[in-house]
DNA sequence: TTGCGTGCAAAGGTTTTGCATGGCA
DNA sequence: TGCCATGCAAAACCTTTGCACGCAA
């Protein structure tokens, strides 16, 4: 993972700083832009998109596309949690990202690989749905 | 399921006809519009969206929102035939969207629901990876 | 006749792109 | 100095909406 690729600009630092601070939730370009402006370090929208693209590319950030309507969401991924080994569940209601390490699920990769010839990249794959807590309410 | 709700207009018939003819694959508004125009029965984009909304509403059509970029995909749902839930595989290399209807995979939803209390929305969930063809090359 | 359906054009929102300028290494 | 990064504005897209007219029932 080439986390340090690219120049180290003020905009990039502010962006990553914000993403890390909000790594426990998903955020979007609008939110990022508003925050950075309010903080006195405005960053152009185009730049935000371009930086996010790179971060998604090198695995630092994960991108979620729910509805084309709402726009994409982004979330910083911690190095420590080895997210390549397990799957993720993203709650469409509360936005929580659940790390799911389950042997039963690991069979899925194997099955799809053997029977369908498709090699799943679990670091990019996210199951969307409604989590336990949100289902109750 | 109130399949016969609404007026029976020429536009609606042409649209449903096209959807049924392509029920084995995903289509989108652009494709629908182009086809109907080429066929000599052009239908306004707004009308297509409005009709699709209704069809999705009453369960005749399923809507998929993968990438905000590509726009939404739609698929006619047959009672009994292809109305079972299925998953999608998206090749990160060639971009192909593979439509995967497999009983083994259907267990996944059930497992995650029962063991982890998470209700998967298969219309939003996509497995990312490398497809058979791209793996060879 | 009634009121939903349609088409057009305009508006809305997100994301991308062109181009000149700025700034890291 | 050589490139990459940035910002602005414009463009590209997909989708929705307003409004007058058309048409099914």
Image (cartoon, coloured by chain):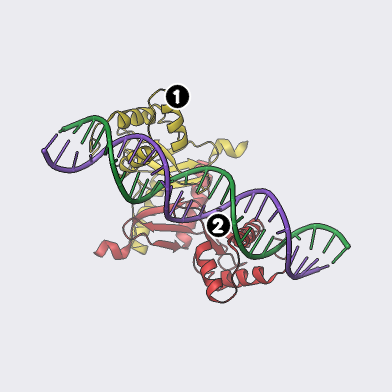
Chain colours: A yellow, B red, C green, D purple
Q: CA distance from mark 1 to mark 2?
A: 38 Å
Relative side of B55 to D5, left or right: right
Q: Nearer the viewer, mark 1 or mark 2?
A: 1
Quadrant assignment for the N terminus of chain B: bottom right
At a point 46% along the width and 30% down the height, the residue shown is: A34
Q: Chain of mark 1?
A: A
Label 2: how many Cα within 10 Å (few below 14, some 14–19, many 20+): many
Residue drawn at point x = 36 percent, y = 63 percent: A115
Work out which residue is located at the far top of the displayed protein and give it.
A39
Residue B81 or residue A14, whichever sits in front? A14
Q: Quadrant of the C terminus of chain B?
A: bottom left
Residue B9 screen position, x and y as percent: 70, 69
Q: Chain of mark 2?
A: B
Depth check, front residue: C17 or A56:
C17
B47 shown above or below A133: below
Instruction: Give the SS element for disc 2.
Output: strand
Whole-percent x, y for residue A90 in the image: 47, 41
Q: Residue furthest bottom?
A: B39
Query: From what the image shows, is residue B22 above or below residue A11?
Result: below
Element assignment for label 1 = helix
Discs 1 and 2 lie in a common subunit: no
Q: Which residue is mark 1?
A: A38
**Residue B13 picture location, percent across and down:** 65, 71
B100 or A48: which is nearer to us? A48
The numbered disc on residue B63 is 2
Q: Quadrant of residue B7?
A: bottom right
Residue D13 screen position, x and y as percent: 46, 56
Q: Is residue D9 left or right of residue B130?
A: right
């Amino acid at each position: 993972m080439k986390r340090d690729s690219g120049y180290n600009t003020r905009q990039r630092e502010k962006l990553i700083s914000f993403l890390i601070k909000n790594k426990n939730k998903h955020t979007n370009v609008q939110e990022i832009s508003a925050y950075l402006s309010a903080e006195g370090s405005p960053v152009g929208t185009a730049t935000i998109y371009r930086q996010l693209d790179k971060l998604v590319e090198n695995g630092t950030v994960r991108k979620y596309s729910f509805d084309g309507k709402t726009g994409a969401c982004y979330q910083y991924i911690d190095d420590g949690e080895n997210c390549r080994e397990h799957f993720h569940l993203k709650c469409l209601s509360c936005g929580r990202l659940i790390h799911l390490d389950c042997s039963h699920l690991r069979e899925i990769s194997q099955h799809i690989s053997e029977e369908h010839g498709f090699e799943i990249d679990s670091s990019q794959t996210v199951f969307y749905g409604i989590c336990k807590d949100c289902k109750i309410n």
